[in-house]
Amino acid sequence: MALGKYAPEAIERKWQKIWQDSGCFEVETDPSKPKYYVLEMFPYPSGKIHMGHVRNYSIGDVVARFKAMQGFNVLHPMGWDAFGLPAENAAIKHETHPAKWTYQNIAEMRDQLKRLGYSYDWRREIATCRPEYYKWEQKFFLKFLEKGLAYRKNSPQNWCPTCNTVLANEQVEEGLCWRCDSEVEQKDMEQWFLRITDYADELLDDLGILEGGWPERVLTMQRNWIGKSYGAELTFQVKDMDESITVFTTRPDTLFGSTFMSVAAEHPMVEKLTADADNKDEIDKFIKNIRDMDRIKRGADDLEKEGIFTGRYCVNPVTGKDIPIYIANFVLMGYGTGAVMAVPAHDQRDFEFARKYKLPMQAVINPPALHEKGETLDAADLDAAYTDPGYMIHSGQFDGMENEPAKKAIVEHLDKSGKGVMAVNYRLRDWNVSRQRFWGAPIPVIYCDKCGVVPVPEEDLPVLLPENAQVRPDGKSPLPDMAEFVNCTCPQCGAAARRETDTFDTFFESSWYYMRYCDPRNEEQALGNQPLDYWMNVDQYIGGIEHAILHLLYSRFFTKALRDTGFVRNDEPFANLLTQGMVLKDGGKMSKSKGNVVDPNAMLAKYGADATRLFILFAAPPVKELEWSDQGIDGAFRFLNRLWRLVEDLEPVLTPEVPTTFTDPASDTAKELRFKEHDTIRRATRDIENEFQFNTVIAAIMELVNELYQVKDGLRETEPKALSSAIATALTLLSPVAPHICEELWEAMGHADRLTDQPWPAFDEKALVKDEVTLVVQVNGKVRGKFQAPNNAPKDEAEKIALSLENVAKYTEGKAVRKVIVIPNRLVNIVVG
RNA sequence: GCGGGCGUGGCGGAAUUGGUAAACGCGCCAGAUUUAGGAUCUGGUACCUCACGGUUUGGGGGUUCGAGUCCCUCCGCCCGCACCA
């Protein structure tokens, strides 16, 4: 059969159909086989896939195909993160319905993914907006409720005025909405929360399990986000009032130096403290000023520290002194208790504040240098707070102690009178999962005037989202206005009641989808034990760094919460994580406004799936950013054509060899080709296994093809089997990257079976042993010559040859040879002086 | 400020972990083929130098027979966190 011109579209269609009809990517739970679960972050069905998706999914597909060739039972699923606000906005704009828009996009994007030839088990596809999916998370929620992991509370929340909904802390970036960049406001609201803080310690500790499997920076980001700090909670009595204020401090050792207190403007005690103040108006104005300031300005590092005296004092529990209580703009209600014991001598912020408002300072930690000289630190001499370790001074019975053990000693002392206790504080807050949005999974609770909050009984699930709802032009959720949705009867007393109209944060869906893939069509259970026990954890997860906190933290929490509610048995969802770099164009992110978007469809039409995949995997290692280059993809396409023509040219002499079947070279040329064949397998295997360095895998295959071009005419008549074997190897190694063309050329070699079903080849160490090797000769570390020597030639022999080289003699002449270093099969370094 | 990463040709990027720096590709140059262009094949291409040779992995220093790789220091860029008490 003649190959003719390389026409990617036709052969790609052909093989995609063959793969689909044969079901070769469909996998079953089979405990007799070793499993490998590779997963890429599923997309939001926004319309079309973009180059970032192509990169993400091409990386995953090579991993999946490679592992399958290595004999693993590979689970490689795909689905749709299908709930979310863009569907509502699109529905308003196009006067359609979010569901219709979403399902259309899914159809379009599924078609694109199929045209890229990815090896998904499409039978396992899930869309999170389907009741068959979200009914299970409604069930999870009921269980969480039962276990006390879900609760409702009224508190100030992040409100995005553009999205018309609250946001979790993780979803606010520098005061802006993560999705639309609007400025986030604070709003008191009654909301549903999940107790992720109950898992703060486990989420932190288990990062240790992920060490080595996850990028260090993601682990660091999660550690920072959880923000565990050790310290103490100390209680200060308010003077002349039957009230006390508790502070969190990491420096209880400095308590004797606390000369005033600072509280947040939002602190619940502020109103009481200032009620009788003479300058009440002034104080209120100050508070209002702070509260009205937007989060960015308030969080800015150059914000001038300001405060105002409340008119009240509290009592330092160890010195017994009255210390003034200030309201300060730099104290945050969201961290610790919203109140800080100020120690100006040993905290830089308090130092600046004290200088500004002429508040007293007392040094209580003596620097070791002074301690040794027998002197003590005077706060008046400081031009900045002293924050390093030292020895206790002006601290009563604790004087002379090192400050570190004094922390505990002071708290224990206070504990006797109930005024202090060791405490751990976290930055992490509970996860607000209520969203005032329509296109999401309904939260399954009912509000009854008599019974209060009543969970929807399990047998009434799912609470269906009415898909016929008409979206409102103002962008607000239509659910609260839909009587047929809202009105219901109380499951407890039967009286008329109202349904919750908030829906789940869409991160709820993505927190467990990877588990549902293991058992996607189970109608009896959310997650069947047998498939889950077999497939979980995900062996390799691949996605963008933007979810370093958000999705990856929520998913880790969900795994643990579902474990504790009896749904699953594993502790961590993702054993290994690869965060791929961004795809850039002209040095920047692709965006419609810049007009530098590369459309995958255009690439498919012009070059085909194989060239697109090849380029994107070749241009940079997966973790680095990738600069899109039109010439680059041209080059990838050129290489595939070159491979194609190689097989076309040799077709008459090719036999259906599998890799490495050529074992008995007669000529030096064939011998060298055989060496290259085996060396390419070695390099390709090593580079895939080591950090998925596909770029160098491809480079190695290119070298093999280049060598084939060099030797093909010399071997085609004499040792064509050497060519067939090497070509079989090139095709097999390249097949995970460019599967269609490799299948086609494999077939052209005369193979009756499919390349996709071939094993990953193994190399023979013996084929890598050369009879002769090139040694480099250096004189004083500079290369002065090279020579051929038998493999593993003895050191003294190599030395003798090296010294005898003409060019080497030139540099050693008249000089004493001090030392000769011989590294067998590599180099000889002659040291002269 | 704290934490993490990075710095190699005109460009994207290699370098078996201390042993010939610049593999592979893009771009560029030359030759072959072609009526021509394109495509293809072959060769060349770090820099300086006519050459011999010299220089080069952000700068400087160190360890070593030998450093892109290890150590110190400085500079620059990127990312994350940041009045976190």
Image: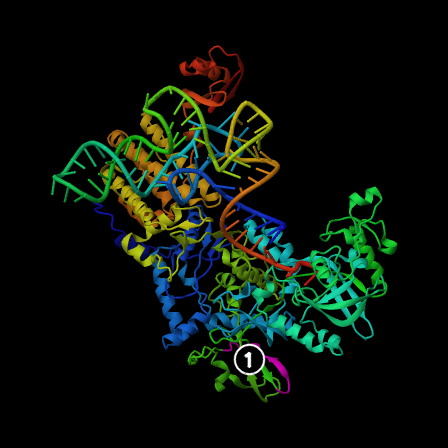
On screen, A6 above or below A178? above
Q: Is residue A87 left or right of residue A650?
A: right
| Residue A596 in sight here | yes
Q: Where does residue A721 sit, x and y in percent of width and height?
A: 30, 34
Question: Which residue is depicted at the point 45% across and 77% down?
Answer: A475
Element on which disc 1 rests: loop
A722, A48: nearer the viewer: A48
Please give the residue where the numbered disc 1 appears in the rendered image: A500
Residue range (magenta) = A449-463
Question: Which residue is depicted at the point 75% across and 55% down?
Answer: A345
Q: Chain of mark 1?
A: A
Q: Where does residue A55 sit, x and y in percent of width and height?
A: 41, 53
Question: Which residue is depicted at the point 76% across and 72% down?
Answer: A311
A618, A297: nearer the viewer: A297
Quarter-of-image position of residue A140: bottom right
Q: Where does residue A56 sit, x and y in percent of width and height?
A: 43, 54
Residue type (three-letter) at the residue carrying disc 1: Glu
Question: Which residue is depicted at the point 43% across and 33% down?
Answer: A764
- Marker count (numbered): 1
On screen, A107 above or below A395? below
Q: Is residue A528 left or right of residue A26?
A: right
Quarter-of-image position of residue A17: bottom left
Q: Where does residue B53 sit, x and y in percent of width and height?
A: 41, 21
B36, A754: nearer the viewer: B36
Quarter-of-image position of residue B81: bottom right
Residue A27 forms part of the magenta stretch: no
